[in-house]
Amino acid sequence: MVMAENVHKSFGRLEVLRGIDLEVRRGEVTCVVGPSGSGKSTFLRCINHLEKINGGRLWVNGRLMGYRQHRGRLYELRDSQVAAQRRDIGMVFQAFNLFPHMSVLANVVEAPMRVKREPRPAARETAMELLDKVGLADKAASFPRQLSGGQQQRVAIARALAMRPELMLFDEPTSALDPELVGEVLDVMKDLAREGMTMVVVTHEMGFAREVGDSLVFMDGGVVVESGAPKRVLTDPQHERTQAFLSKVL
């Protein structure tokens, strides 16, 4: 579903990604961990071309993201073409990013109606099913300010799912939440994993990575330091840098 090949990304003189190679198979949950500033979130944003890469290639579901290749050269796609590619990729951010002036239901139906031109009744029916799925059908008429952080993040997940994505990206979805609210968001993500959703999750929740992840990637300094089955990486890390990181977070 995702293939990254020697991906580089710089902001001015700061090289944030220094050659990322990574594969995510369809139906797998890949958890990405590492210290702050290691490039985790930047890489996630590169997957759906929210950040333009400076080198390498990134494919999602067999499509080269953000570019077309002709005779060995890359040509950047138009914004409308990139937007079309993103329709199959859902993303949940750390800071919810709900529309504050819209009700919960309106937040969820907006993209299917505006982008996919779904009729309102069909979009509404799907939205209510998704809100029920995340345990918030009774909050459909509420506004984001009336919800807890955990509830807002569950609405954000429902909103992303309303576009029927083939891939879900999660950028530290629980890091802005009070500890007691983390579980309700992780439970929704666990349900998605059981249903076979392909997911790339940047997270600090090692228990989630151990329980749900099919693979665990440890990043530092803009490179993949170590990757493998979560239980193996967490209990028997091979790289000294991985060992040092895990000794502080486990």
Image (tube, helix red, strand yellow):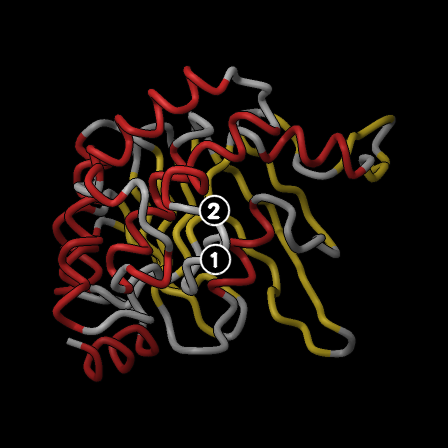
Q: Which of 200 and 82 is in front in this view?
A: 82
Around disc 1, counting alpha carbons within 10 Å, would you say few (fewer than 14), some (14 to 19), or many (20 or more)?
Answer: few
Which of the 4 quarters of the picture holds residue 219?
bottom left
> Horizontal placement of 192 versus 98: left or right?
left
Q: In this view, does 244 lie above or below 229?
A: below
Q: In the picture provided, is 87 more to the left or to the right than 192? A: right
Q: Is residue 190 above or below residue 248?
A: above
Residue type (three-letter) at the residue carrying disc 2: Leu
Q: Which residue is drawn at 25% across and 28% down?
A: 196
- The amino acid type, in three-letter code, at marker 1 is Pro
Q: Residue reaching furthest front?
A: 141
For the point 24% across and 42% down, the residue is 214
Q: Position of residue 242 (x, y in %)?
A: 30, 73
The spot of residue 11 in percent (x, y) is 72, 71
* Sequence order check, earlier mark of 1 and 2: 2
Instruction: List x then y, in percent, for residue 161.
Output: 38, 33
Please tell me whether mark 2 sits on a helix, a strand or a loop. Answer: strand
Element type where label 1 sits in the image: loop
Q: Nearer the viewer, residue 186 or 99?
A: 99
- Toward which corner of the image does residue 129 lie, by quadrant? top left
In this rendering, the answer to whether 82 lies above or below 8 is above
Q: Which residue is drawn at 12% across and 50% down?
A: 211
Instruction: Read off the residue under disc 1.
Output: 100
Q: Which mark is residue 130?
A: none
- Badge 2 crowding class, 10 Å Cα cut-off, few under 14, some 14 to 19, many 20 or more, is some
Determine which of the numbered discs, if any, sits on residue 22 in the image. 2
